[in-house]
C-alpha cells in the first residue's frame, strides 16, 4: 500500500512498505546504520538462499557483509524441503522450498539442481493403468530466486510418434557390445537423478536423467524444445557432465562410459560412446566379492570418483572409503588416489554431488565428505573426515 506522499519501498518479503522520514532525508536504508558484525551474524541465520540474495541488494554495507559471511550451503531433500549446516557441521531444522502454484503438487520430488535451479518431478496423474501408477508425470525446472518455470516433456507416454520415431545403434569403443538410442518411442520414467550441462538461463543446455521404473534403469536425454531420447545402456547408476561430455557410471560393476553429444541439421544426438574405465585399482575389495557403491563429483576442475566399500550391502556398513581423480588424458582413463580436499568439503547423494570451499564459511571444518543416504532423512547422515579416516553421525540442529 502506498502512502499519501507516494514514498514506498520493498522489504525482503516483496511487500510494499512506507519509508521513514530519516530514510528519505538520508537517501539510504536504515540497514546501513547497523554494525557490520551484528548484521553478519543476523544474515547467517537466514536459511533461504533467496532471502540472502535479496539482502545482498539492499545496500553497499550489506553487500560487504554478505561477501565476508558467505551463506552456508543449502541441502535440498527429495521432498522439496531444505536444510543447511551450522558452524558446527550439524543440520538446521528442515523447511519447505516455496514453489510456484503452477507446479505445486502432492508428493513433489526434487531430483537435481544447477546454480539456483531445482529439477522437480510430479507423480503420474493417470492412476488407471497399474503399470504406470507409480511413474512420474511431469518434470520441470524452477529457479528458486526468480520463480521462473521451464517445463520438460511428460515422463509417461503411451502413444507412438511414428513420424518422428528414430532408432540408432553405436558400438562401444574400448568395450564390447552396442548401445541403442531411441527417440519418440513409448516410455515410462521414474526419475532418481537429473543433471544439466549448463544453466537453463542459456538456450544451449542438455538435460540428462536416470530413471529406475520397475527396476528397469534407463538413461534419458533432453534438449529444450525436443522430446526425450532413451539410451539403452547396461545398468546406469550415476551421471555427471564434465568438460562438455556426459559421464555414466554403471551399477553392477565400476565401469565408466563417456558420451559425446553433438547437434547437426537433424538435431541433438549422441555421436560416440566409449568405455573409459574398465578396471579398478589392484586388490580392490570388489574383486574379492565385497559390495561397493560409487559417485562422481567435479572438484577444482577435476572429476573425482568416490568409492564406498560395504562389508554388508543390506546393512550399509561402510568399511572403507577411497577417492580417485580421473586422468582423462589417458586411454583408458587413469586413477590417482587423493588423500586431501585442500580444505574443501563435498556432499554426496543419489540426486547429485557438490563441492564447496569450507574456508569461505566461518567455523566450518574442511576435508569432510557428507554422505546422504538414497532415502535421505536429515537425522541419518554421516560425515567422513579425510584427515583421519573417521566417520561420525550428523545430528539435526
Image (cartoon, rainbow, N blue to C red):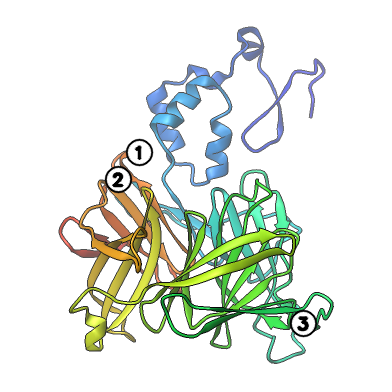
- Of residue 78 and residue 6, the one placed in the foreground of this image is 78
* Residue occupied by mark 3: 126
* Residue occupied by mark 2: 364
Q: CA distance from mark 3 to mark 2?
A: 46 Å
Crowding near the residue tagged with mark 1, few <14, some 14–19, many ≥20 C-alpha atoms within 10 Å: some
Note whether 235 is above or below 295 in the view shown.
Answer: below
Q: Earlier in the sequence, mark 1 or mark 3?
A: 3
Q: Quadrant of the N terminus?
A: top right
Image position of 164 (left or right of 198) = right
Residue in the picture at 64% in, 7% down: 25
Image position of 98 (left or right of 294) = right
Residue 349, image x and y in percent?
Answer: 42, 66
Image position of 211 (left or right of 313) = right
Residue 343, image x and y in percent?
Answer: 26, 46
Note whether 161 is above or below 348 in the view shown.
Answer: below
Q: Earlier in the sequence, mark 3 or mark 2?
A: 3
- Of residue 46 and residue 218, the one placed in the foreground of this image is 218
Residue 272, image x and y in percent?
Answer: 54, 69
What's the mark number on residue 360?
A: 1
- In the displayed orientation, state which residue is furthest to the bottom: 130
- In the displayed orientation, state which residue is furthest to the right: 163
- In the displayed orientation, state which residue is furthest to the top: 25
Q: CA distance from mark 1 to mark 3?
A: 47 Å
Q: CA distance from mark 2 to mark 1?
A: 8 Å
Amino acid at each position: 500500500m502506498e502512502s499519501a506522499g507516494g514514498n514506498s519501498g520493498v522489504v525482503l518479503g516483496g511487500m510494499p512498505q512506507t519509508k521513514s522520514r530519516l530514510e528519505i532525508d538520508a537517501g539510504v536504508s536504515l540497514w546501513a546504520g547497523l554494525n557490520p558484525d551484528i548484521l553478519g551474524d543476523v544474515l547467517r541465520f537466514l536459511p533461504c538462499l533467496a532471502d540472502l540474495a535479496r539482502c545482498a541488494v539492499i545496500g553497499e554495507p550489506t553487500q560487504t557483509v554478505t561477501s565476508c559471511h558467505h551463506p552456508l550451503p543449502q541441502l535440498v531433500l527429495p521432498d522439496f524441503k531444505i536444510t543447511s549446516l551450522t558452524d558446527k557441521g550439524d543440520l538446521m531444522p528442515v523447511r519447505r522450498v516455496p514453489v510456484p502454484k503452477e507446479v505445486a503438487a502432492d508428493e513433489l520430488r526434487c531430483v537435481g539442481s544447477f546454480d539456483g535451479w531445482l529439477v522437480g518431478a510430479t507423480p503420474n496423474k493417470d492412476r488407471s493403468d497399474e503399470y504406470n501408477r507409480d511413474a512420474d508425470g511431469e518434470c520441470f525446472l524452477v529457479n528458486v530466486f526468480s520463480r521462473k518455470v521451464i517445463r520438460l516433456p511428460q515422463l509417461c507416454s503411451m502413444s507412438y510418434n511414428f513420424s518422428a520415431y528414430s532408432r540408432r545403434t553405436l558400438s562401444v569403443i574400448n568395450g564390447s557390445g552396442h548401445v541403442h538410442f531411441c527417440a519418440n518411442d513409448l516410455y515410462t520414467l521414474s526419475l532418481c537423478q537429473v543433471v544439466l550441462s549448463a544453466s537453463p538461463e542459456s538456450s544451449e543446455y542438455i538435460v540428462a536423467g536416470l530413471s529406475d521404473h520397475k527396476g528397469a534403469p534407463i538413461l534419458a536425454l533432453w534438449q529444450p524444445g525436443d522430446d526425450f531420447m532413451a539410451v539403452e545402456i547396461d545398468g546406469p547408476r550415476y551421471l555427471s557432465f564434465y568438460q562438455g561430455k556426459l559421464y555414466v557410471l554403471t551399477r553392477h560393476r565400476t565401469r565408466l562410459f563417456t558420451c559425446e553429444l553433438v547437434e547437426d541439421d537433424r538435431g541433438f544426438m549422441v555421436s560416440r560412446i566409449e568405455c573409459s574405465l574398465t578396471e579398478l585399482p589392484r586388490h580392490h575389495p570388489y574383486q574379492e566379492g565385497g559390495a561397493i557403491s560409487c559417485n562422481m563429483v567435479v572438484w577444482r576442475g577435476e572429476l573425482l570418483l568416490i568409492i564406498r566399500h560395504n562389508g554388508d550391502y543390506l546393512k550399509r556398513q561402510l568399511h572403507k572409503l577411497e577417492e580417485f581423480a580421473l586422468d582423462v588424458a589417458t586411454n583408458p582413463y587413469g586413477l590417482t588416489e587423493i588423500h586431501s580436499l585442500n580444505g574443501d568439503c563435498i556432499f554426496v547423494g543419489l540426486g547429485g554431488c557438490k563441492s564447496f570451499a569450507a574456508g569461505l564459511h566461518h567455523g566450518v571444518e574442511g576435508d569432510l565428505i557428507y554422505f546422504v543416504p538414497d532415502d535421505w532423512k536429515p537425522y541419518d547422515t554421516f560425515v567422513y573426515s579425510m584427515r583421519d579416516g573417521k566417520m561420525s553421525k550428523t545430528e539435526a540442529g
